[in-house]
Image (cartoon, rainbow, N blue to C red):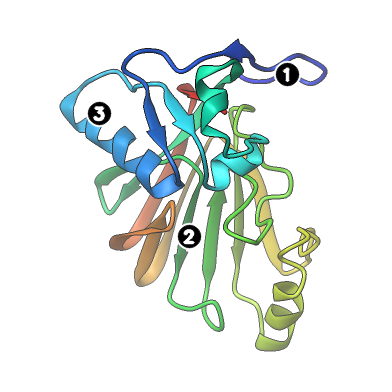
Amino acid sequence: MGIRRGGDWGTSGELPDGGVVVSNDARAREVVEAARRRGEALPVLGLTGGDLCRTLGGTGDRARLHEGGSALTCDLGSVLLDGRLHWFTAHLVARHSWLFGRILVVMNAAYMGGWNLGPRAHPGDGLLDISDANLPLRQRLGAWRRLRSGTHLPHPAIATTRRAAFSTSFERPVPVLLDGVSAGRARRITVRVESDALAVIV
């Protein structure tokens, strides 16, 4: 069960035998995808870096993973890209360019690099934070300057929603990044959250 308002989340824990230490979101996604493709249970991930780790308050201290770190159960994003199934741990971005055209951002974590793209996103609430926009250049540059602090939201020209599932389509295939890694191009994008699917230690 995901986090509930006013409730505790997580316990003290250590990385178990068979757990996998990952230093970034791309590696976390690689481990998740490999296990899912083999039909295996997801291993516990020890996070030492990346946007999911930062969102969870991880320090990057590898020793904590074996000496009483925080054990948390997180949501996982799954996505169909023109019918091709993939997963992501932190975020999905679909866009041709940051400077022009439509941009779709789906956040499980709050951060993407130095940007706080999902200021309300929580990896344990059973929801994905979705922003969909096609801003004029002047408004785009203004929002860009506020990405680091997360104050680009709310914005009257950025459609935002928090949902467990979402589907949309682009006029033509658009490049899609999952946890910062290219997943190719797609026109039809369907995302859903897998609540409490991923166990992590930070």
Image quadrant of residue 5? top right
Q: Nearer the viewer, mark 2 or mark 3?
A: 3
Residue at 62%, 51% in the rendered image: 111
Q: Is residue 39 left or right of residue 144?
A: left
Helix, strand or loop status at disc 1 = loop
Q: Residue 3: x percent and y percent?
A: 67, 20
Residue 47 or residue 138, whichever sits in front: 47
Q: Marks 2 and 3, Cα distance to the nearest angstrom?
A: 23 Å
Instruction: Identify the residue position indicated by label 3 in the image.
Output: 35
Disc 3 and disc 1 in contact, CB within 8 angstroms: no
Image quadrant of residue 86? top left
In the drawing, what numbered circle is on residue 70?
Answer: none
Residue type at mark 2: give it: Val
Instruction: Identify the residue position indicated by label 1 in the image.
Output: 4
Residue type at mark 1: give it: Arg
Instruction: Identify the residue position indicated by label 2 in the image.
Output: 93
Of the image marks 3 and 1, the number of the one nearer the N terminus: 1
Of the image marks 2 and 3, the number of the one nearer the N terminus: 3
